[in-house]
Image: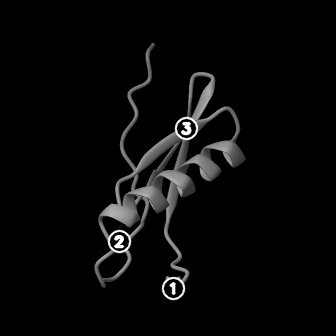
Amino acid sequence: MTNYSMKTLTAIIQKEEDMYVAKCAEIGTVSQGSTVEEALTNLKEATELYLEEFPLKKGSHPILTTFEVAEIANA
């Protein structure tokens, strides 16, 4: 009998052309879909498959923050 526990992970989703690309910040797994929901579902599946082979080590979440950069305007 296999015991399962749930773990909350972080997904970063970006629109690239006509697809949404989702990346798990803690694991590094990446997937895509035609909608945000599909990209997230595909990422969950890819991450679960990855974790079957490479179990998650105990640790903390990455630090997520934002920062600003100067944007050069074309005249």
Residue to which mark 3 is pinned: 32
Instruction: Give amino acid for label 2.
Output: Pro
**Residue at horizontal 38%, vertical 77%?**
61
Q: Earlier in the sequence, mark 2 or mark 3?
A: 3
* SS class, disc 3: strand
Quickly name the residue at label 1.
1
Residue 62's disc is: 2
Q: Residues within 10 Å of mark 2 (few under 14, many from 20)?
A: few
The amino acid on which the numbered mark 3 sits, given as a three-letter code, is: Gln
Q: Residue at x 68, y 43 (%)?
A: 38
Name the mark nearer the viewer: 2 or 3. 3
Q: Looking at the image, which residue is at 51% across and 86% down?
A: 3
- For residue 61, which numbered disc appears in the image? none
Name the spot of residue 52 as percent of width and height, x first: 39, 65
Q: Which of marks 1 and 2 is nearer the N terminus?
A: 1
Q: How many labels does the image show?
A: 3
Q: Which of marks 3 and 1 is nearer the N terminus?
A: 1
Q: Where is residue 21 in the image (x, y as percent from the top left)?
A: 52, 39
